[in-house]
Amino acid sequence: MAKRSVRDLEISGKRVFMRVDYNVPMEDKDGVMVVNDVTRIRETLPTLQLLTSKGARVILAAHLGRPDGKREPSMSLRPVAEKLSEMLGKPVAFVDECVGDKAEAAANALGNGDILLLENVRFHAEEENNDPVFAARLARLADVYANDAFGAAHRAHASTCGVARIVRAWGGPCAAGLLMERELKFLGDELQSPARPFVVILGGAKVSDKIKVIDRLLEKADTLLVGGAMAYTFKLAHGGKTGRSLVEKDHTGTALAAEAKAAQRHVGFHLPTDTVVAELRDTGRLNKKGKPLLEPVNPRVVSGDIPDDTEGFDIGPATAATYAAVIAGAKTILWNGPMGMFEDKRFAEGTLAVAKAVVAATQEHGAKSIIGGGDSVKAINKAGLGDKVTFASTGGGASLEFLEGIALPGVEALDEA
Ligand code: AMP
């Protein structure tokens, strides 16, 4: 169901309380916290430009990190306010509280078109508990509620849904920001009746993390391409050898059930035919869990079984070529999860080949390509191809849950269109 949009609101002179996802990577530079990656801030600029041009008084709420309900100076949003101001080319006020007299005074001091960023809502434990009293204190800052934080919409917290409930009870509108609107369009509406062939590419570490998405997408997809460590559980389920690779022994049944469903629904189902493997060398050091730290050495490509003394880290070149050929024929593509341990460039080739194939299908054949969040977005950005796909989701857990068909509390809290 479509949600009400900030586009359609009369907001001149109104206090628009907007939840944004400013959970940005920060770095300590000579004792000063600085924003390391502005992507999440940049994504909110269109909504902010719209709201301020309509004369709204914008009050932004966000979380940063996991301060566990305590004031933690390194997780203050003050540097984000400075960065936002720089990016918008206009002042952005900041108040070191998100509720109470000081926050209310700062909100009430705004003129039409002004912006205020509140301090980290997670400095209060009541935020994550969705405490109704805390939500009511936040709601004192709002005439209108808006949400542009798709990445936090799977959380039922005070700023993502509690405050909306109160604003609605007072008769105020609760609307989606432009980014939220795009996320719902591409991860939701566009996949309802996709142009065919609809090719789904799924990778990542675990079958158990993705099984609900697989199950749901098997209802819609024409072809499913499987990569990442998740593919080894399928291999094991077929009696193949997986060496020292990451597998989920308890989920071989889950894997076989997914394949059976694909066959029953005539969905093309591809597993890797070759693998980039490496031996594991003991570094003599311990990892964070106190276990010996092993490093992959001597990478090579194998077909079929994975030798006992090696671990699989990427799809091989034959698989990458097959997958690229399938992708070239697609009219709609959804991709979630890398094909291998792409963080190490020796094992990034498979993911890169898939990224290039997705971009070529988009640019040359007019396919609609949707990158479903998390590590696949990181991988495509790392390859410098992020702006060459139709849509790259800003959500991680939220994208996955949305694709699974779970109702997200932060979306449910918004008015229907
Ligand atoms: P996910 O969050 O489930 O999408 O998983 C992403 C993570 O899976 C990334 O950090 C990858 O490095 C990791 N990954 C993908 N394939 C492999 C593999 N073959 N072996 C180890 N890790 C992998």
Image: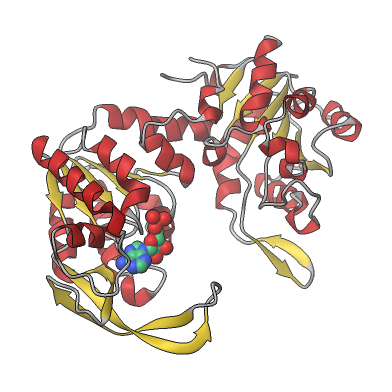
User: In the image, what residue occupies the spot 31% across and 48% down?
Assistant: 335
From what the image shows, is residue 368 above or below residue 295? above
From what the image shows, is residue 214 above or below residue 202? above
User: In the image, what residue occupies the spot 79% across and 54% down?
Assistant: 72
Asked whether the viewer can see residue 395, the reply is no
Q: Quarter-wise, where is residue 305 in the image? A: bottom left
Farthest residue to the top: give it.
171
User: In the image, what residue occupies the spot 21% across and 38% down?
Assistant: 218
User: In the image, what residue occupies the spot 59% across and 40% down?
Assistant: 45
Q: Quarter-wise, where is residue 288 in the image? A: bottom right
The image quadrant where one finds ligand 1 is bottom left
Identify the image quadrant of the N terminus. Answer: top left
Q: Position of residue 160 (x, y in %)?
A: 62, 31
Q: Position of residue 303 (x, y in %)?
A: 12, 73
Farthest residue to the front: give it.
250
Q: Position of residue 52 (x, y in %)?
A: 68, 30
Q: Position of residue 213 (x, y in %)?
A: 32, 41
Residue 48 falls left or right of residue 336: right
